[in-house]
Image (spheres, rainbow, N blue to C red):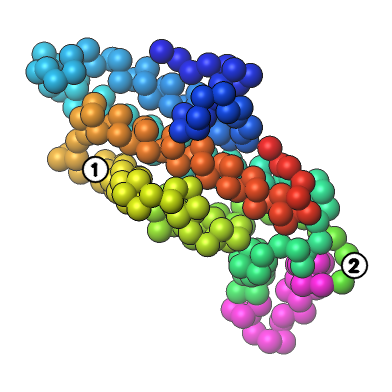
């Protein structure tokens, strides 16, 4: 059964009657999960039953892992872009941004200077002042480049996900999205398993498989995480901009 339209949709993990205010990236992720569910229906093996076509069952499971992991990663890139676009639209002072975020944004410019002989750093310094100085004080305003903020991420492992949200001022996103230790641990395990299996499959490991039950657990974990993290990031961006609302 497909998810309800945006106007009628509610959070999967929120009490009934709670309205969903979501980023466009979360809306896109809902549709992506529908796509994974469509793929799963290609395997008609009954729950708890034996597959009449083991090869098809195996291929559907592997493909579902790759697809879901890719959509999860796309969500992170998308919501990062939305957050930077919101701040750029509000013309927020650079000094209002978290220190980690400013350092990350300036990293490529600084690294470029360090790798250049000192007598040839003039152009680098001019570009740095033009593009990055606004982050470090003064009256000038500039724009964040969303690509710089995720250029380092190779795959959305739980460790990398924590690092990403920390740049936005959220110390531990998994602790932020749930207070229950067992829920937090289970969520991290499922996300880690999903990404590891996706990487193994992408690197040609023929032994990596995922049952329909596995895929269902990964789907539930990513949905639960993205919904709750979406709200957390929205509030974090709002705090940076003086309690405005990005979504």
User: Which one is earlier in the sequence, the residue at label 1 or at label 2?
Assistant: 2
Instruction: Provide residue 195's location: percent of width, then percent of height.
Output: 34, 45
- Judged left or right of residue 39, residue 4 is right
- Judged left or right of residue 14, residue 145 is right
Q: Main secondary structure of the magenta part?
A: helix
- In the image, is residue 133 part of the stretch drawn in magenta? yes
> In the image shown, does 216 or 133 lie closer to the viewer?
216
> In the image shown, does 4 or 154 lie closer to the viewer?
4
Disc number placed over residue 139 in the picture, else none: 2
- Judged left or right of residue 62, residue 225 is right
Tell which tag, 1 or 2, sits nearer the viewer. 2
For residue 47, say whether it is visible.
Answer: yes
Query: In the figure, 104 relative to 198: above or below?
Result: below
Task: Name the image quarter holding residue 169.
Answer: bottom right
Secondary element at tag 2:
loop
Disc number placed over residue 204 in the picture, else none: 1
| Quadrant position of the N terminus in the picture | top left
Q: Could you classify mark 1 by the number of other residues whose Cα lies within 10 Å: few (under 14), some (14-19), or many (20 or more)?
A: few
List the single residue furthest toward the right: 139
Residues at discs 1 and 2 in contact (Cβ within 8 Å): no
Secondary element at tag 1:
loop
Which residues are drawn in magenta? 112-137
Marks 1 and 2, Cα distance to the nearest angstrom?
52 Å
Query: In the figure, 60 relative to 193: above or below?
Result: above
């Amino acid at each position: 059964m497909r998810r309800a339209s945006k106007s009628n949709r509610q959070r999967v993990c929120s009490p009934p009657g709670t309205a969903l205010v979501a980023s466009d990236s979360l809306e896109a992720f809902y549709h992506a999960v529908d796509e994974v569910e469509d793929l799963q229906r290609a395997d008609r093996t009954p729950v708890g039953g034996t597959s009449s076509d083991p090869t098809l069952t195996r291929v559907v499971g592997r493909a579902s892992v790759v697809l879901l992991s890719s959509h999860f990663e796309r969500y992170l890139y998308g919501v990062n872009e939305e957050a930077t676009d919101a701040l750029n639209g509000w013309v927020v002072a650079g000094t209002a941004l978290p220190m980690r975020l400013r350092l990350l944004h300036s990293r490529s410019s600084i690294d470029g200077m360090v790798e250049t002989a000192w007598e040839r750093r003039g152009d680098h310094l001019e570009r740095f002042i033009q593009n990055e100085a606004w982050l470090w004080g003064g009256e000038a305003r500039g724009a964040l480049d969303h690509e710089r903020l995720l250029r380092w991420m190779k795959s959305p492992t739980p460790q990398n996900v924590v690092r990403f949200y920390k740049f936005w001022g959220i110390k531990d996103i998994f602790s932020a999205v749930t207070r229950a230790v067992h829920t937090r641990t289970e969520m991290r395990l499922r996300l880690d398993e999903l990404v590891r299996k996706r990487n193994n499959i992408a690197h040609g490991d023929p032994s990596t498989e995922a049952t329909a039950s596995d895929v269902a657990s990964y789907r539930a974990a990513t949905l639960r995480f993205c919904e709750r993290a979406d709200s957390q990031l929205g509030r974090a961006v709002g705090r940076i901009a003086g309690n405005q609302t990005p979504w």
